Image (tube, coloured by chain):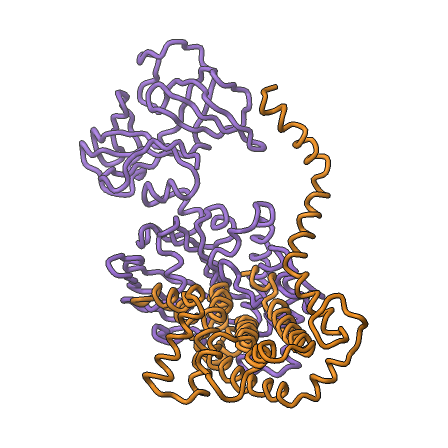
């Protein structure tokens, strides 16, 4: 049974549909992220769960009890705000104890539980300071402790880590995971940052334009993205334009700018018909780069029946163990490749290839115009 | 090197060489311009002798003793307080409501309200003074006391609003959401979160309003007409008919009240409190 059940959740602001018929579940003890670009409605979903916004339509059930219509102070959820919203006129300990005070917990017990929380977030001895005396990372911990001390059924996060620098953010991510496991609490985390979401979540809800694009584990979203949008949003992706030439039981035939390639049928999530325009998507890390002797860019140099083309290295960047190359290909425009080898230089001619088994194919029906993104963001 | 450069270069060199000394000179000159007359006044309050002559023959506390035994002056202080205290209370209440409305709600005429509440600052005092006599005393026929309290409220609202409004604007309303999220209902949220955060600004607005009202002369002089004078009107009458160094003493009392109120207001609206979100 799920702890949080959201069904048909819709929120309209005037003519704008911010959240459109959203369904998802969060199981007890799970860490679920709602991931989407800004304006996708993810924060609105969170604020409806917290009780700051009233849904136009739909149900939100916590522990099988409908909570739509009940005020925020009666819901068994606590939120870590984007800008943290620590009380500036109270000390760190008073901030953390605020929720306990509201629910009438006696002062002794309050002090003890606040102390325990400070320990949990590794801020022992900080209780008497004011929030402004703390660093950004320390303030995050106070906000987290303030939400957790009440032992809510569900803790909501509205992108609280977005203001931190990369290193601190990564540290706080692992802290979040540790604390979630230690407290056995359920976390619902909203972010536009796929890196954070991939790192911390058990499952992801991908939202775009108020609608759910896909719900699944990190692996599912990365390996089997349901749409070009998800493929683009979760990790980098190269897209090659193509047209369907044949569909049979096991394979789909594609014309990719003069070359005929056949791919496994299950590379396409939706049913395709002959003549459909499609995007053939491939992850940069699945692209191979090899040195080539072929000097001219004539079509006959291309290997038939495979995803293979020649090109010129236009950019490269070292990313630790991998190198990322931007390659201007003769057939498919600019592609990006992530390979172990650092052997290639700008202006080198190379052969670029990948396996037909690794691609994903999506119909282009005008919902997301191809903009030849090379995956860099 | 152009002709102009040849002329200006020596000045530039001088300015560069003596930049910090020149800055000091300018600051001292400006402060002297602002405060020297007041310093002389404070000094003269200790002067012996019956006329406003400088320099004094010797220094004395005589005029302070005279002031403290002068029933008319003390009565004037009491009269002032009976006007200023209620006027301050009403002014702060109205200014807080105006600030709250302008900050929280979007309503027709919102910008007009903000403008009208603060505009009286630039209307010449004499104009408003005459208008008030015409309206409150003439048209409405209100008693002097009521008229003068209303006049003081009108005089102080713009300033109190200008002090209180930023407090509301800088108050982060997410704090109210956080409070409700943590289980406090609307009333508890107002009591435990909103009020403590905006209170210093309201008190500062009140102190400023009180200082202005305590010092208010023009409206009072027009509206109050005869009857017990307030302290500023009393001083005016003294200077007109009977100049004694006691007036200097009363002025020093004024100065002390005004400066301490403003300092209290400044310390309450500590810059760091407003700066942090």
Q: Is residue B216 left or right of residue B55?
A: left
Q: Is residue A268 above or below residue A214?
A: above
Q: Give residue B172's position: percent from left, percent from top.
A: 49, 64
* Quarter occupied by the N terminus of chain B: top right
Chain A colour? purple
Q: Give residue A262's position: percent from left, percent from top.
A: 29, 28
Q: Is residue B76 left or right of residue A197?
A: right
Q: Is residue B53 left or right of residue B76?
A: right
**Number of numbered discs visible in the structure rendering:** 0
* Most foreground residue, B221 or A138: B221
* Most foreground residue, A193 or B105: B105
User: Can I make out residue B185 in this image?
Assistant: no
Q: Give residue A10's position: percent from left, percent from top.
A: 29, 62
User: Can I make out residue B181 in this image?
Assistant: yes
Q: Is residue A146 above or below residue A204?
A: below
Quadrant of the rendered structure where residue B275 is?
bottom right
Q: Is residue B229 above or below residue A247?
A: below
- What residue is rendered at 41% in x and 52% in y? A35
* Most foreground residue, B136 or A223: B136
- What residue is rendered at 39% in x and 52% in y? A216
Q: Give residue A240's position: percent from left, percent from top.
A: 32, 29
- What residue is rendered at 27% in x and 57% in y? A17
Quadrant of the rendered structure where residue A96 is?
bottom right
**Residue that protrudes farthest toward the right in the picture:** B58
Chain B colour? orange
């Amino acid at each position: 049974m799920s702890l949080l059940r959201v069904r048909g959740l819709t929120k309209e602001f005037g003519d704008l549909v911010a959240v459109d018929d959203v369904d998802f579940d969060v199981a007890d003890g799970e860490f679920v992220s709602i991931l989407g670009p800004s304006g996708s409605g993810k924060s609105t979903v969170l604020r409806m769960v917290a009780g700051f916004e009233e849904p136009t339509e739909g149900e939100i059930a916590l522990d099988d009890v409908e909570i739509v219509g009940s005020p925020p102070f009666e819901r068994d959820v606590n939120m870590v705000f984007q800008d943290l919203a620590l009380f500036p006129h109270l000390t760190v300990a008073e901030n953390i104890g605020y929720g306990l005070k509201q629910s009438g917990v006696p002062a002794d017990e309050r002090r003890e539980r606040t102390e325990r929380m400070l320990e949990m977030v590794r801020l022992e001895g900080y209780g008497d300071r004011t929030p402004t005396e703390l660093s950004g990372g320390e303030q995050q911990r106070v906000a987290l402790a303030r939400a957790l001390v009440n032992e809510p059924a569900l803790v909501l996060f509205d992108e609280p880590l977005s203001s931190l620098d990369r290193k601190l953010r990564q540290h706080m991510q692992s802290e979040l995971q540790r604390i979630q496991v230690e407290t056995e609490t359920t976390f619902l985390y909203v972010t536009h940052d796929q890196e954070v979401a991939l790192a911390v979540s058990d499952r992801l809800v991908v939202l775009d334009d108020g609608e759910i694009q896909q719900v699944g584990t990190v692996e599912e979203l990365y390996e089997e993205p349901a749409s070009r949008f998800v493929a683009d949003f979760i990790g980098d992706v190269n897209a090659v334009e193509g047209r369907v030439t044949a569909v049979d039981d096991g394979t789909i035939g594609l014309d990719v700018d003069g070359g005929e390639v056949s791919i496994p049928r299950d590379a396409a999530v939706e049913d395709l018909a002959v003549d459909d325009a499609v995007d053939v998507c491939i992850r940069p890390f699945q692209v191979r780069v090899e040195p080539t002797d072929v000097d001219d860019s004539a079509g006959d140099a291309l290997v038939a029946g495979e995803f293979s083309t020649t090109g010129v290295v236009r950019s490269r960047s070292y990313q630790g163990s991998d190198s990322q190359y931007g390659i201007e290909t003769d057939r498919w425009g600019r592609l990006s490749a992530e390979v172990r080898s650092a052997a290639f230089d700008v202006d080198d001619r190379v052969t670029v290839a990948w396996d037909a088994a690794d691609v994903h194919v999506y119909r282009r029906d005008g919902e997301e115009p191809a903009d030849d993104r090379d995956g860099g963001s | 090197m152009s002709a102009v450069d040849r002329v200006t270069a020596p000045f530039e060199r001088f300015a560069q060489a003596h930049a910090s000394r020149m800055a000091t000179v300018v600051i001292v000159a400006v402060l002297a311009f602002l405060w020297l007359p007041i310093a002389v006044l404070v000094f003269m309050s200790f002067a012996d002798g019956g006329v406003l002559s400088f320099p004094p023959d010797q220094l004395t506390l005589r005029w302070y003793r005279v002031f403290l035994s002068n029933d008319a002056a003390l009565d004037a202080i009491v009269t002032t307080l009976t006007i200023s205290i209620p006027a301050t209370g009403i002014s702060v209440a109205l200014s807080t409501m105006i600030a709250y409305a302008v900050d929280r709600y979007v309503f027709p005429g919102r910008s007009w309200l903000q403008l009208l509440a603060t505009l009286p600052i630039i209307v010449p005092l004499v104009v408003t003074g005459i208008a008030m006599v015409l309206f409150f005393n003439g048209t409405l026929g209100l008693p002097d006391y009521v008229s003068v309290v209303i006049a003081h409220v009108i005089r102080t609202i713009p300033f109190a609003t200008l002090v209180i409004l930023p407090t509301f604007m800088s108050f982060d309303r997410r704090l109210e959401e956080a409070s409700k999220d943590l289980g406090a209902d609307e009333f508890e949220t107002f009591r435990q979160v909103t009020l403590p955060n905006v209170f210093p600004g309201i008190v500062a607005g009140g102190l400023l309003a009180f200082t202005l009202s305590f010092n208010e002369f023009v409206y009072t002089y027009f509206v109050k007409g005869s009857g017990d004078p307030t302290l500023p009107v009393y001083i005016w009458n003294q200077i007109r008919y009977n100049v004694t160094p006691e007036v200097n003493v009363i002025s020093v009392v004024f100065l002390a009240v005004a400066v301490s109120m403003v300092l209290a207001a400044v310390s309450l609206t500590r810059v760091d409190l407003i700066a942090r979100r």
